[in-house]
Image (cartoon, grey):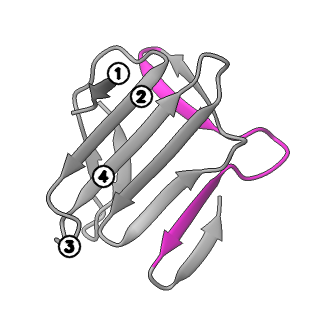
Amino acid sequence: GLRSLPTARGLPSDDGTFAVFHTCVVKPGCYFYEVGQSKDYFYKRLEMKLHVDGKCDYKESVQGRSLRATSKAFWSVESDVLILESPKSGPSFILRESRGSKSM
């Protein structure tokens, strides 16, 4: 089932601050967080699926920007911090802004 992901650090807002949330213990499963309505400027949405094999699906939308994981993204937990990373072979996240796209 879905778990509420009400501590994560998201995309920066226009003022350069990051969203910070208190969370439950992170383990394989589906996580969802949403604030506001999709037409609002301050709308935020996070969807994350952590697979048992270490792969992850990740989508985040903040103020017209979106960040998503490609199929090569991996997750782990170190010192109670969720780490999302790409293999050394290439980028695993795509950042889309209203002015274009960039692979990271």
Image: 76 above or below 74: above
Image: 102 above or below 79: below
**Residues marked 1 and 2 touching at CB (< 8 Å):** yes
Residue 3 image point, x, y percent: 29, 24
Whole-Å distance between the Cαs marked 3 and 2? 24 Å
Query: Residue 75 vs residue 89: left or right?
Result: left
Residue 75 image point, x, y percent: 59, 28
Which label number is shown at residue 30?
2
Residue 55 appears in which quarter of the rendering?
A: top right
Q: Is residue 82 magenta?
A: yes
Q: Residue furthest right?
A: 89
Whole-Å distance between the Cαs marked 4 and 3? 12 Å
Earlier along the polypeptide chain: callout 2 or callout 4? 2
Q: Is residue 95 magenta?
A: yes
Q: Residue furthest front?
A: 1
Please tell me which residue lies in front, 68 or 78.
68
Q: Nearer the viewer, mark 1 or mark 2?
A: 1
Q: Secondary structure at mark 3?
A: loop
Q: Amino acid at mark 1?
A: Gly
The residue pinned by badge 3 equals: 39
Which portion, as a residue range, is magenta? 79-97
Query: Residue 70 vs residue 66: left or right?
Result: right
Q: Secondary structure at mark 2?
A: strand
